[in-house]
Amino acid sequence: MQSKVVGSRGPLWLDLSRQLKYGAEMDWDLISKTYPDDREGIALAMAIHKVVNMSLKDAELSGIDIVKISTSNFSEIIPALSHVVRSAWVSYYKTEPPFDMNEAASSFIGSSSIKVPENVSHVVAVFFNNALRAILKKLRETSPEPESILSGSCSFCGTYARIIFDEEAQRTLFCPLCSHSWRYPRVRCTVCGNTDHETLGYIEAEGIEGVRVYFCRQCNHFIKAVDIKDRITPDAETMDAITLELDELAREEGLNPVP
Ligand SMILES: [Zn+2]
Ligand SMILES: [Zn+2]
């Protein structure tokens, strides 16, 4: 067997760090390898992710008021969401969805439970979550660059960052919905803004290299941070997905995920 020698282009993570983006094409193989018992569910999630992104192409997004989006008021995108989910559903199942699409979209945006028959609710949620992310990401990419503000929540869509990438002194936060990324101080809670060393800290888990759970004892929230010089790191969304064990660990410590 021949091994390939890679030329001296500097450490691998340096090259990778330039490509890091939430919402870059996800590494489904890596997710599947991380959760071998859930291969079937992951294959379904990947198929839905792809079909939703294809259905996004002809969605009408031009009339959407992005000022409302910045306050997490997503009612503006209900028509686009209905359109994308319906079209993705039809191309995947070759049949019309067995529920009222507008009612489902409104309930998805308005509350946490989607008004659809129980037997399809799980799969419908996967369609809606993917469609919401795809629409917000496209809106952000086609809108002016959001202004940079000192906040742990996204200045484009108002969602709290769920994962951090650290590179030397630089900390970058990623929005899990629209894929926006922005700089943030190293020593500052992303939820309440606390900067007191005494009440900020982190936990590491054995066997998970280069990823820590940072917590704040003032608001009791946690967020995961990847040190990108310590590990070869895929896109932020995949990174979040393959470290769910840490979320579990943080919950066991009595910490809450970001709101
Ligand atoms: Zn966002
Ligand atoms: Zn806090």
Image: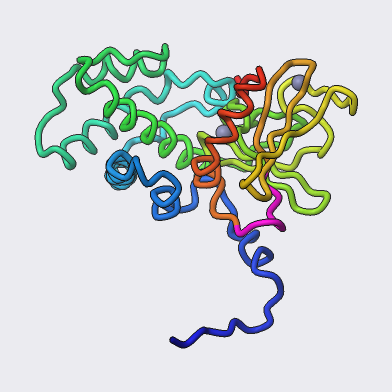
Residue farthest to the bottom, as pictured: 2
Look at 60% across and 35% down and name the residue there.
246
Q: What stretch is highlighted in magenta?
A: 226-232
- Residue 114 shown left or right of residue 189 in the figure: left
Look at 83% across and 49% down and name the residue there.
169
Residue farthest to the front, as pictured: 206
Look at 41% across and 52% down and name the residue there.
33
Is residue 57 visible in the rendered structure shown here?
no
Q: Residue 17 in the image: x percent, y percent?
A: 65, 59
Residue nearest the observer in this picture, 236 or 256: 256
Quadrant where ligand 2 appears: top right
Quadrant holding the C terminus: top right
Q: Residue 11 in the image: x percent, y percent?
A: 70, 70
Locate residue 101: give its quadrant: top left
Please say whether residue 68 is one of the residues in the magenta stretch.
no
Q: Residue 91 in the image: x percent, y percent?
A: 17, 42
